[in-house]
Structure formats: C-alpha cells, structure tokens
Image (tube, coloured by chain):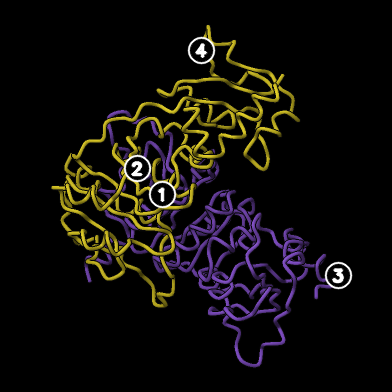
Chain colours: A yellow, B purple
Amino acid sequence: MLSKSNSKRITGLLQKKYRQREGLFVAEGIKVINELLNSSFELEAIYGLDSTSLRIEKGSETIFHKITPAELKKISFLKTPQTALALFKIPTQLPNVRQGITVLLDDVRDPGNLGTIIRLCDWFGITSLVCSTQTVDCYNPKVVQATMGSLSRISIVYTDLVAYLQQEQRPIYGTFMDGTTIYGASLPDEAVIVMGNEANGISNAIEQLVSHKIAIPRFGQLQKTESLNVATATAICLSEFKRGVSIEK
Amino acid sequence: MLSKSNSKRITGLLQKKYRQREGLFVAEGIKVINELLNSSFELEAIYGLDSTSLRIEKGSETIFHKITPAELKKISFLKTPQTALALFKIPTQLPNVRQGITVLLDDVRDPGNLGTIIRLCDWFGITSLVCSTQTVDCYNPKVVQATMGSLSRISIVYTDLVAYLQQEQRPIYGTFMDGTTIYGASLPDEAVIVMGNEANGISNAIEQLVSHKIAIPRFGQLQKTESLNVATATAICLSEFKRGVSIEK
C-alpha cells in the first residue's frame, strides 16, 4: 500500500531542493538497490512488487513495503519501471583531502557522464571529486542509476572552483585541444585533473589557473571527430595517471 | 505541412525492419544534423521549425519542409524534441578489411554505449567495427544521436562472431577480470579487440577463440567497484593500443 502523501514525497525527490530538505535520494532496480544495500548507505525504505531478490538484512524486513505495478509506475522516475524503488539517506559528507589525485569537474551537466566519472574514480582509487556548483547534482536519480555503489566511496564536494584552485599546491592539469600529448608526459602521483563542460570544455577563468595543458592525441587520416565524450576522456586521463603506478609494482 | 503518410513513415523508422525496408534513418537536432550534412551521408529530407541554422547546400533547399512544433512532437523520438528532424539514406556498406585494429562487439545492447564506441573508434583512427547480430543496430536513433558524424567514417558489419574469428589471422585480445594487465603488455599494431556485453561480458563461445586475455587493473584499497562501463573500458583499451604509435612519432 502506498499512501498519497508518501507517493508525493517520493516524486518530489526528483528535485534537488526536496532531496536536500528530506536528506533522501532515490535508487531503482534490484541490481542498483542491492549494490547500495551492500555499501555504507543507510536505507530508509523500499517499495517493491516482491522482496525475494533484495538483500535486506535480517531485522530490517519492516522497511519493505509491498506495492502494485500501478503504484510503482506512479513513483518511478524511469520510463520503464523496474520491480523496486528504494529511498536512502544522503550521507554526511566524507572529508575531502588535498592529496593524491583529485578530479575537478567544471560544469559537467549530463547525469550519465557524472555517474560514469564517479564509477571511474572508484575504479582508479581516486576518492576525491570536486564539482563546480553548476555541475549536475550527484544524488540526481539518473546519476545514482549510473554510479551504483561507487557513490558511497567517493568524497564529492560542490564548491567555487576558482577559490578551490587558488588554494591548491599540487600541479593543476587540464585537457585542451592544443595541449601537450598526455602519452609522452611524466605524470605525478599528486595532482588535480580538471575536466570541462560537454559543449564548451574548460571555462576561461579555470584555464588561467591550469598549470599543465595536456591533450589526448587524435589518430586517423581524416581527423574529423569533433571531440571525445567527457566521460571517455576522463577514463583515458585517469588510466594514464595511474598506469605508471601499476607497472612499477 | 506534414502529411499523415509521411508522419507514419517517419515514426516507423524507430523499428529496424522499417529502416532496412526504407533504407533510411533519423537524426535529430541542429548539431547532429549539421554534423551529418558535413559528412558523406546523403540527405533525404529535413523537417523543421526553421532552416536558418541548418547547413543545407545551395540547390537543396526544397529538401527542407517547414512544420509546426506540434507536428515535430508527433514525429520526434526524443522526450524533448529539438527544432529539426532529418532523414538520411543508409549508405552502402564500407569495405571491412582485416588489417590494423578491428574492434569486435559481443552483444553490446545499450545504444549510448554503441554510439560512444563508434565515436571512440573514429578518434583513434580505427575504421573497422564488427558487431554480433545481437548488438544494437547502429542506425537506431539513439545510436545516431550519440555518434554524430563519426558513423559515416566507420565500416560497421553485423555478423556471426564465431565464424568471423575462426577466419582471423591477427591475435585476438579480450578483456577479462583475470587477464594479464594491459599496462605491462607489448601490444601489436595489428589485432582484434573483443569487448563484451554490459551485464555478462564476453560469451563462452568467443572466450574460447581469444588468444590474449587482458585486464584493466583496478586500483584503491576497497576494490569494490563491480566493473567498468563497456564504453569507458573500450576507451582505455584503444588508448593503450595506440599510445605506443603516438610516442614513437
């Protein structure tokens, strides 16, 4: 059973201001929910057709609310709802430390891109992500779907990037079409890597603060590809920064 | 003005069988349409609110059909329609040659992933992509949106991968969790690289035919990230195969 007030409360969470007020975010689908149940996130409630595939801890069964497919359709943010939707508590922010590699996002707007970048940071052991205030919210349902459990292991801060970078001691890398090839460069273990907006790249104000302009070379005779997607460019950069560590071992 | 029969014909192109029967595919949005107009694709017609931002060649203006926002909404495949929709002819297939690097996709199902991989191939100068028959169709509207002009520069073949690989002379690389680290490996200029399905990876039948099992190492103490997205894994693999060429130059 789903009360009208609960239904309204859940659909409100599509908006950032309601997520912040309630301190809750939404995750959908058995796979994503189980990933989050298996992380440090704290579960508030699950609404689903059936609890059999869910990894709910013993003693927490009352947190599961059986609903009908029509009720699920009403609260789901997905075009094709899955079989369950869960509410998790937005955690207290992890401490953001200025050491090792930090990734900075200068207005990344697409939720799928942010989700993929969070998952990549987790893969490459990077725990610190700093986003401009115009970057898409990491508790946006589409970001949550794309990151799965990784969201719980990364410290994500939203702040003014100029002020952040003015306090920075580490070298600041940014990708530009006219930068030095990343493949030949000797890359440090301690650095900030700035990735730009999908359409406009790195903004002028941030470009002034970049100490090392790098580029991912383009191959082929035609060289007509306009640009790499920001998530795939991040993948290649992080791989280059980390591959040296891996080979030394 | 949009006739009822034209409207029906366009919406039918969401389905692969109608795309194959008509020999046409759909692209939406000024940016994507202009990218395709600037490629070797042949334009059939454009339906739009206004032609001013479109790079239509002189003499081809009759190909533009002015329609209303309500008519565009009816034919658009996007949740939020842009200002124009174009029909392009599906080109005669480019020759697929067994030389250099060929990327093989073993049942990649997500249109966004296929689109990103096509764009990556173009960036890295790889012109040959071979897809299993269960891989999403490259003229699916969502794939077209993600690839933009790159689609015209890559030879994409759908075929039985086992039969294709049994005829292969080049080394066959595939990514597996238990493979050898890609960072230490000496990678050849001529190779086939197999990328697997989003949920299940490379299938058993194809695994039997892989001559070199490689892995992208995972970093960090927790090592809980389940897997890399197939498009970001492809980005890292292609970067590793090509970086040597770049450094030698």
Pinpoint residue A171: horizontal percent, then vertical percent: 16, 52
Q: Is label 2 in a helix, a strand or a loop?
A: strand
Task: Provide the residue designation for mark 2.
Answer: A158
- On the image, the x and y values in percent for residue B49 come to 68, 73
| Circle 1: residue type | Thr
Q: Circle 4 sits in a helix, a strand or a loop, which is it? A: loop
State the CA–CA distance, disc 2 to disc 4: 33 Å
The residue at 76%/30% (across/down) is A70
Q: Earlier in the sequence, mark 2 or mark 4?
A: 4
Q: Nearer the viewer, mark 3 or mark 1?
A: 1
Precedes in sequence: disc 4 or disc 1: 4
Q: Are marks 1 and 2 in contact (CB under 8 Å)?
A: yes
Which class describes the residues within 10 Å of circle 2: few (<14), some (14-19), or many (20+)?
Answer: some
Circle 1 is placed at which residue position? A135
Q: Chain of mark 3?
A: B
Q: Chain of mark 1?
A: A
From this view, report whether residue B178 is shown above or below residue B155. Answer: above
Outermost residue on the right side: it is B4
Marker count (numbered): 4
Residue annotated with mark 3: B5
Q: Is residue B90 above or below residue A157?
A: below
Cα–Cα gap, marks 1 and 2: 8 Å
Instruction: Give the residue type that dot 2 points to.
Output: Tyr
Whether the residues at callouts 4 and 1 have beta carbons within 8 Å, the answer is: no
Element on which disc 3 rests: helix
Compute the Cα span from label 4 to label 1.
35 Å
Left or right of residue A223: residue A161: left
Query: CA gap, disc 4 to disc 3?
Result: 56 Å
Residue A59 lies, with reference to residue A67, above or below; the image says: above
